[in-house]
Amino acid sequence: MKHKNSHLLVGYWSRLRKGRALPDQTDIDPRAIKRMLPYVFILDAADLDRPLYRLAGTSLCERYGRELKGTNFLAHWEGQSRGALSSLLRQALKLKQPVCISSIAATADCGMVELETVMAPVTFGPGEPTRFIALVQIMSDAMPLVGRVIAFERLVASQLVREDEPLAAFDVPPPPPSETARSHPKAPYLRLVVNRDKPATLHFEAEDLVKRMFQVFGAAANDPEGELVG
């Protein structure tokens, strides 16, 4: 995870568990995450081939140019990404761990931005978990989205998030790690773990992203699987 708010959301999710494997959706207090609410959504993944937005922040809806509640989360993703995302959601629910997704989103006139989405599983009553609380953040220059909306998105990387120690208080951003903190055995941190035996998504270093995004979307123009699904 790169964005501060991604760490904050996962830290809040962790504290809500209170010794349980997962928190329940009813435990979530919108006031505790009010600064991030415009970009937060609740996803119902009971049907992994058609996961639905149950709630979505207003700014997130504006970014995609429509009311997202009740719509298919996979609708604007290209074909190969849809299959990989379904598998990722299944894995996160089974392991009861958050997943961090990196993607490239494009407007109809080929403006592109890098997005980071963190999705943390939650229960909704008794039984196995089928829902996520999630947050989407822009990681690059947002100018391509000024006056435009996202029309197409492609998955470029995914990683499970595993906690090794509790995070700092949710409403206090963590300070930059010092050399002492890095070496201390009790220093809190989140660890991103790639499970290469699971969904075959693309993984590469962050500095390669800009170059790859042009390669990816250059090929997407002639990709029949890239057609949008209603």
Image (cartoon, grey):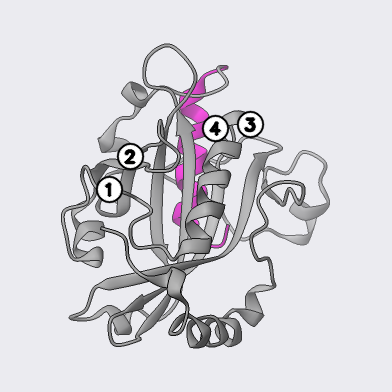
Q: Are marks 4 and 3 in contact (CB under 8 Å)?
A: yes
Q: Nearer the viewer, mark 2 or mark 4?
A: 4
Residue 93 marker: 4
Q: Which residue is mark 2?
A: 42
In which quadrant will I find the N terminus? bottom right
Q: Quadrant of residue 27?
A: top left
Residue that numbered label 1 is attached to: 37
Is residue 34 something that shows in the picture?
yes
Give whichever of discs 4 and 1 has the lower sequence position: 1
Q: Please give the name of the residue rendered at 42% of the width and 71% of the height, measured from the top-left corner.
A: 226
Left or right side of 95 for 137: left
Residue type, numbered disc 1: Leu
Question: Camera-side residue: 120 or 91?
Answer: 91
Labels 3 and 2 touching (C-beta < 8 A):
no
SS at badge 1: helix
Q: Position of residue 100 (x, y in %)?
A: 55, 52
List the residue tagged with mark 3. Answer: 95
Circles 4 and 1: CB atoms closer than 8 Å:
no
- Distance between the Cα atoms at labels 2 and 4? 14 Å
Q: Write down the region rendered in magenta.
A: 1-19
